Image: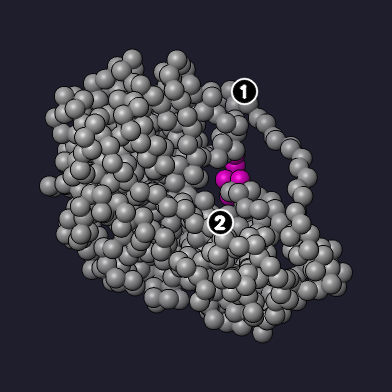
């Protein structure tokens, strides 16, 4: 990406919890916008365009609900679009907003979304509907079983144990204690995870994210305005996205181009993002990550694909505490997606949490000297990947516009 | 998390009943007609040498039309599997096992149930379904041209 440098100057998140009976869907989105505008010190009149972040709407039960939210997010009279790449939606919506600003078409863009997953009693039934009716739908695919298939393959390749995945959950819930908006948080043990109900091998209940309701908003603007409005903007130094075939069976075995177990397409996206941001040694140059990890098994393949360590070694680094808040790199200071998953905005929450690290506004989650913080998002049949780098300086070359 | 204090009359209930008719397409029709004859038919691309299940009209690697139908072997190798022990709305009652299997002669893996297994001890059953394990295709007696006409059993 070349063009005008882009920065985050404000973010807003509601608390995330199972239900919001005191607010409707657009009222929830509105709350996040108010928080983000206050955080940025910007009025809604100064927003030039809105990108709405929303994944499948069947969970909350109003089709194409973005139209319901238009006036609530002060979009009336302005350009408005919804972006949807499943779980990766928030990352993709943020990427679209960055392109809006970077191209010079709009100066200040609001990315906002809200989701509510428990309006319907079984979200996994809705998620079964994302597969084709001819070849895959009949075989009980949903995001739990889909990811269980990848996890079993990963365990077979690298000898990972259920205990090693459980340690990821323990760390996530502990980190989330510092996050005022996190849905699940607390001190739990490896045994608590192992003793929770079996869902789909190797998953127990605690290996799986909750269904969260809530909203998030992020305000991006061009460098000149950002420096004027914000003492410490979070610059978007790199942004990349990648997609892969919906057929997971194409991503397995000797003829596969990328391995489903490894989320290996992320290697390509990471290299693109790193080349923009000037990253040559991720573990040394990146201080924290906000990974999209709705299951305990996501972190290891993602960290390996992002180049933080070699294949099959993340589990050992995790055991040794390398990914703790005081380890080699802070993985998900917020507790991540394992603790909070409002699907349509989760990727945006990752960006917001990463940006607040750079801005020095992460509160009890703050990582010292955060200069580069990475956010990811994943969606579809783990087929969409978005990687965003937030940095204390733009890093990227500015085109002469 | 927090228990709602919202009175029941402030919650509006609804169900969606939407009906659909999905055409399977020309390539799908050939595949599903093959199932009626207890054959699993894959598409092949001469340029890339890839053989696809589910069948594809077009090879995304070579950017050519798949030009041949190939009868897949009725045995194959597990690439990934799981054993489901929780109940989900509108999905089969647990427990059940599903696996991606690369049938002999085919480049890609296809999902289906693995049946006729004792799933009472989940870790033990999972150990039986490791990638690399061989399985066989078993057709139902009266195939009706649906992907559910067959399933896998351990070889």
Tell which tag, 2 or 1, sits nearer the viewer: 2
Q: Which mark is residue B9?
A: 1
Residue at the spot 40% in from the left edge and 49% down from the top edge: A241
* Residue B155 visible at all: yes
Instruction: Kindly state the secondary structure of the residue where label 1 is placed.
Output: helix
Residue A325 position, x and y percent, is: 21, 54
Q: From the viewer's perspective, is residue A349 above or below residue A169?
A: above
* Residue B99 visible at all: no
Q: Are marks 2 and 1 on the same chain?
A: no
Residue A287 position, x and y percent, is: 19, 52
Left or right, A391 with reference to A45: left
Q: Quadrant of the C terminus of chain A?
A: top left
Name the residue beneath numbered marker 2: A246
For label 1, the crowd category at 10 Å Cα-Cα, with few meaning under 14, some 14 to 19 and many 20 or more, is few
Residue A247 position, x and y percent, is: 57, 60
Which colour scheme appears in the figure?
Answer: one colour
Q: From the viewer's perspective, is residue A197 above or below residue B38?
A: above
Left or right, A9 with reference to A208: left
Highlighted magenta segment, given as a residue range: A120-126
Residue A258 position, x and y percent, is: 45, 66
Q: Quadrant of the N terminus of chain A?
A: top left
For label 2, the crowd category at 10 Å Cα-Cα, with few meaning under 14, some 14 to 19 and many 20 or more, is some
The answer to if A368 sits in the magenta stretch is no
Left or right, B36 with reference to B74: right
Residue at the spot 47% in from the left edge and 53% down from the top edge: A243
Instruction: Kindly state the secondary structure of the residue where label 2 is placed.
Output: loop
């Amino acid at each position: 990406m070349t063009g005008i440098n882009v920065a985050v100057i404000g973010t807003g998140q509601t608390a995330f919890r199972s239900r919001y009976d005191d607010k409707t869907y657009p009222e929830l989105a509105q709350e996040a916008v108010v928080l983000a505008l206050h955080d940025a010190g910007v009025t809604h009149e100064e927003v030039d365009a809105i990108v709405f972040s929303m994944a499948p709407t069947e969970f909350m039960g109003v089709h194409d609900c973005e139209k319901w939210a238009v006036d609530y997010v002060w979009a009336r009279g302005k350009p408005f679009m919804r972006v949807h790449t499943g779980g990766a939606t928030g990352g993709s919506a943020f990427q679209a907003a960055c392109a809006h600003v970077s191209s010079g078409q709009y100066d200040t863009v609001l990315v906002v979304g809200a989701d509510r997953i428990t309006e319907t009693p079984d979200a996994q039934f809705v998620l079964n509907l994302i597969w084709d009716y001819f070849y895959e739908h009949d075989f009980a695919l949903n995001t739990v079983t889909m990811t269980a298939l990848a996890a079993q393959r990963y365990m077979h390749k690298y000898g990972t144990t259920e205990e090693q995945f459980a340690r990821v959950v323990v760390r996530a819930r502990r980190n989330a204690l510092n996050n005022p908006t996190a849905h699940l948080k607390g001190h739990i043990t490896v045994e608590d995870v192992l003793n929770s109900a079996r869902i789909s091998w190797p998953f127990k209940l605690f290996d799986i994210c909750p269904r969260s309701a809530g909203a998030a908003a992020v305000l991006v603007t061009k460098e000149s305005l950002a420096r004027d409005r914000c003492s410490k903007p979070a610059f978007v130094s790199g942004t990349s996205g990648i997609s892969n075939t919906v057929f997971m069976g194409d991503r397995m075995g000797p003829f596969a181009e990328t391995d489903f177990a490894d989320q290996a397409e992320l290697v390509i996206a990471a290299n693109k993002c790193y080349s923009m941001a000037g990253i040559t040694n991720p573990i040394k140059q990146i201080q924290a990550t906000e990974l999209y990890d709705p299951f305990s098994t996501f972190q290891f393949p993602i960290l390996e694909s992002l180049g933080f360590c070699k294949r099959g070694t993340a589990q050992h680094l995790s055991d040794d505490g390398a990914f703790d808040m005081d380890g080699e790199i802070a993985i998900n200071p917020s507790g991540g997606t394992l603790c909070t998953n409002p699907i349509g905005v989760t990727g945006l929450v990752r960006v917001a949490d990463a940006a607040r690290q750079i801005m020095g506004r992460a509160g009890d989650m703050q990582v010292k000297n955060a200069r580069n913080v990475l956010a990811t998002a994943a969606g579809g049949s783990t087929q969409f990947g978005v990687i965003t780098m937030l940095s204390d300086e733009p890093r990227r070359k500015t085109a002469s516009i | 998390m927090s228990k709602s204090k919202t009175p029941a009359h402030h919650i509006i209930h609804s169900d969606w009943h939407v009906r659909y008719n999905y055409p399977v397409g020309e390539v799908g029709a050939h595949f599903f007609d093959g199932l009626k004859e207890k054959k699993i038919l894959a598409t092949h691309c001469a340029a890339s040498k890839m053989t696809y299940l589910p069948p594809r009209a077009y090879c995304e690697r070579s950017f050519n039309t798949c030009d041949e139908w190939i009868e897949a072997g009725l045995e194959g190798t597990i690439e990934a599997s799981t054993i489901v022990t929780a109940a989900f709305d509108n999905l089969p009652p647990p427990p059940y096992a599903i696996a991606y299997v690369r049938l002999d002669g085919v480049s890609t893996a296809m999902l289906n149930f693995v049946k006729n297994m004792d799933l009472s001890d989940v870790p033990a059953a999972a150990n039986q379904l490791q990638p690399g394990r061989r399985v066989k295709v078993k057709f139902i007696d009266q195939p009706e041209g649906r992907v559910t006409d067959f399933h896998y059993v351990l070889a």
